[in-house]
Amino acid sequence: MSTIERKFTKKESRLYMAFMYVTYISLLIGGLMGLLQTLARSGKYNLPFGIDYYTILTVHGVILGLVLTTFFIIGFQFSLLGKTVGISDKQLKIGWISFWVMVIGTIMAATTILVGQASVLYTFYAPLRAHPVFYFGLALVIIGSWIAAFVNFRQLYVWKKANKGQKSPLLAYMVTINMIMWVIASLGVAVSVLVLFIPWSLGYAETINVLLSRTLFWYFGHPLVYFWLLPAYMAWYAVIPKIIGGKLFSDSLARMAFILLLMFSIPVGFHHQLTEPGIDPTWKFIQVVLTFMVIIPSLMTAFSIFATFEATGRKKGFSSLFGWFKKLPWTDVRFFAPFIGMVAFIPGGAGGIINASHQMNALVHNTIWITGHFHLTAATTVILTFFGITYWLVPHLTGRRLTPKLNKLGLIQTWIWTIGMVIMSGSMHIQGLIGGPRRSNFSEYAGGEQVASWINYQIAQAVGGTILFVGIILMVHIFIQLTFFAPRGFQEFPIAEEEIDAEPAPKVLENWYLWIGITIALILFAYTIPVFDILKHSPPGSPPFDWPIGK
Ligand code: HAS
């Protein structure tokens, strides 16, 4: 039996579904917080029960940006490895341990936020200080994800031993790269939480080195966004071709793109700190150059997707320049939702290039333009692709089918999301360009001249946010249907195959020592001197800035 046809056991499906349950519960809670935020910022509504704006802002960011994404990605990646290289009973057990460690960490962090003891936003910038339990909770989420990573590495290792000389299946290779990146990147945030934040929040250290903590955060923070993006790329490269009736465009190109993403996604954190004093401009410039390097694999991905669409269409007999485009499976939500995600990545990626362009960053940094940027990239490109995956993965795991009715609901959901996001993210971009700040609810100061020029955009954001929340309810409904109520049957787990005459992938692409070695060398080059500078020249540490501020 080919590895692709491997069937999941019930025990396996249960583990992968456990991650999906947390994902969709998070979507509901985090989405509700997003709705409340946009309503509060519109200046037309006050939050009920004395709820603090920054508490819901933190719940929204942590639950959607950190919890939903991590659970979906780890569950999805487990299923990809289960399908392509298999999972043993022991690995399954350790997979459960990773799940529970992450759940316990999430509950600890979420509780401290909900009781108002950790309104520190998802970046938990010092000198904002949270309750120690918040940081311990985050540390557990990271440890849980590492356990999952090591299970994944072991899965591929066992397969390689049993299949000597064979190249690893493409999806298994991609998952491995994403998890290597995740482990290397999350070391930064782990050091920052364990060495800086926990002793400080427990009162053992009176002050904290703010610049160092932010630098360690962004060493992790940029690869974090690629940790979200890469599973979407896995689906674009290796799932979508099968759904549209085509083949992989190029296995080697896909592997090369992932290697470049591994090498260049980490040594670029300074592009989030371009306006910060205390970092030598030369090192900022070097990291901006490296940021432009990490754009290349995304351009390769765009090229590869267009080529797949065109090659598939031409094989089906469409010869005119754009004939293939008309015949894409527009009414299949497994294709349509990720496709809208791809389209959103064109302006989303262009926005990223603007952000990274040093001088232009001065215009947009800390404005709500940035919020618009990541709602296009993370909350549209990535999330719509995750929804697209859900439509086939969940029924495959639950032994049900995506019915035509649910498919239609999915198409409606995608349109609702698109309309809501165009309005919300569009108005965020514009308001950012006229100076509207991010992460603040200044509606209580309405009446000032500048605020008056922003207010219409904030109302637009509330309208967009409301439409998006309708989309969330619909998506949760579809998830429940696919999990418990859709008719029993078989739903395909679509994995694209290579062309019969495809060139073999060069062996060097699996030389892990080489690629991890280059990645570490680049990180050391980009960070060693500036971090020494920070340690040597930092001003005295900052005392805590406890929440709620000024109360
Ligand atoms: Fe970003 C800030 C730069 C990509 C997320 N980003 C953020 C923050 C988040 C985020 C969450 O340089 C805010 C952090 C905070 O809270 O402070 N970003 C970039 C660059 C890229 C980029 C250069 N970002 C992402 C992705 C994200 C994400 C992906 C989430 C998933 N970003 C920045 C910078 C900042 C920043 C600065 C800091 C700003 C500041 O001052 O604070 C690149 O990776 C983008 C490359 C992408 C492309 C697009 C390729 C297009 C493709 C689609 C093809 C479509 C097809 C469909 C084929 C070059 C692959 C067919 C279509 C037809 C029409 C037929």
Image (cartoon, grey):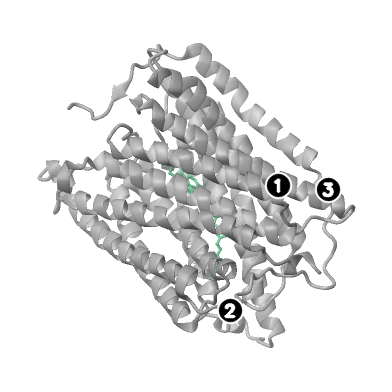
Q: Which of marks 3 and 2 is nearer the N terminus?
A: 2
Disc 2 designates what residue? 489
Q: Which residue shows up at 66% across the image and 27% down it?
A: 524
Q: Name the residue under label 3.
A: 508
Picture coordinates of residue 128, whole percent (x, y): 34, 27
The answer to whether 186 is drawn above or below residue 419 in the figure is above
Q: Is mark 1 on a helix, strand or loop?
A: helix
Residue type highlighted by circle 3: Val
Mark 3 or mark 1, whichever is nearer to me: 1
Give the class, few, some or many, for how many residues have Cα within 10 Å of label 2's Cα (few <14, many ≥20).
few
How far is the residue under mark 3 from the one under mark 1?
31 Å
Between label 2 and label 1, give the one nearer the viewer. Answer: 1
Q: Say whether disc 3 or disc 1 marks the residue closer to the N-terminus.
A: 1
Please name the residue shown 34% across and 53% down the image.
29
| Quadrant in the picture for residue 1 | bottom right
Question: Where does label 1 land, which residue?
Answer: 90
Q: What residue is drawn where x is 79% and y is 55%?
A: 168
